[in-house]
Image (cartoon, grey):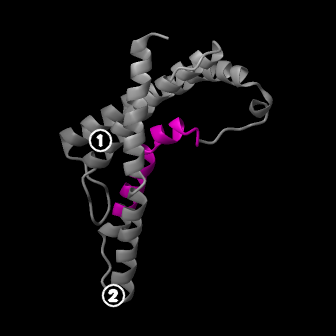
Amino acid sequence: MPNAIKTYVRCVDAVNRRVGKLALYLVFVMMGILLFSSISRTFFNVPFDWTMEMAQFTMAAYYLLGGGYSMQLQAHVRMDVLYERWSERKRAMVDVLTSGFLIFYLAVLLYGGISSTLYSLEYGQRNYSSWGPPMAPIKIIMVIGIILMLLQAVAVFFKDLAKARGKELV
């Protein structure tokens, strides 16, 4: 494989590793928000409108920003009916073929995400709830997460292509 592809794979892996490890801490942020909500409601009888939605947004950011990292670690769900029995090289060949579907899906998702984010920014879209937070921040995070996952999908494609040819990329 050309050096440019090797550099691309190393850079994408490094970025997704860092972002993914930072995103792991968002679970603790979400837990803190929910704990605050429980304490304020139970002990002080002061419910806050924003806590549940903020916890949902934090969880969404967690899995959107961690998607590329989980793909890098091969921690995503895979149905191993036949896959487990195949050789490493045959798995890589099948993964090369199916990567095209994933990359297409992520590209369409990115197109829709960008469109939705631009709409949200242009019209100041707010969520229809009693708190009514602006939707642009979570949509921007969504687009960033999709971009990171798309970049990682392309990197995994190159790794699988090298494996299918009987070589290691990195």
Q: Nearer the viewer, residue 48 or 4?
A: 4
- Magenta: predominant secondary structure element? helix
Instruction: Report whether 65 appears left or right of 88.
Output: left
Confirm whether the magenta stretch covers residue 41. Answer: no
Up/down of 53 relative to 12, above or below = below
Q: Which mark is residue 24?
A: none
Residue where numbered disc 2 is placed: 45
Q: Let me know if residue 109 appears in the view.
A: no
| Callout 1: SS | helix
Residue 110 percent across, percent down from the top left: 39, 30
* Along the line of sight, the residue nearer the viewer: 106 or 158: 158
Q: Is residue 66 magenta?
A: yes
Question: Residue 2: x percent and y percent?
Answer: 45, 10
Q: Helix, strand, or loop for circle 2?
A: loop
How packed mark 1 is, by other alpha carbons closer than 10 Å (few <14, some 14-19, many 20 or more), is some
Q: Which residues are magenta?
A: 54-75
Expressed as whole percent of the image width and height from the top left, the position of residue 101 reads: 56, 23
Q: Residue at (38%, 32%) from the top-left corner?
A: 147
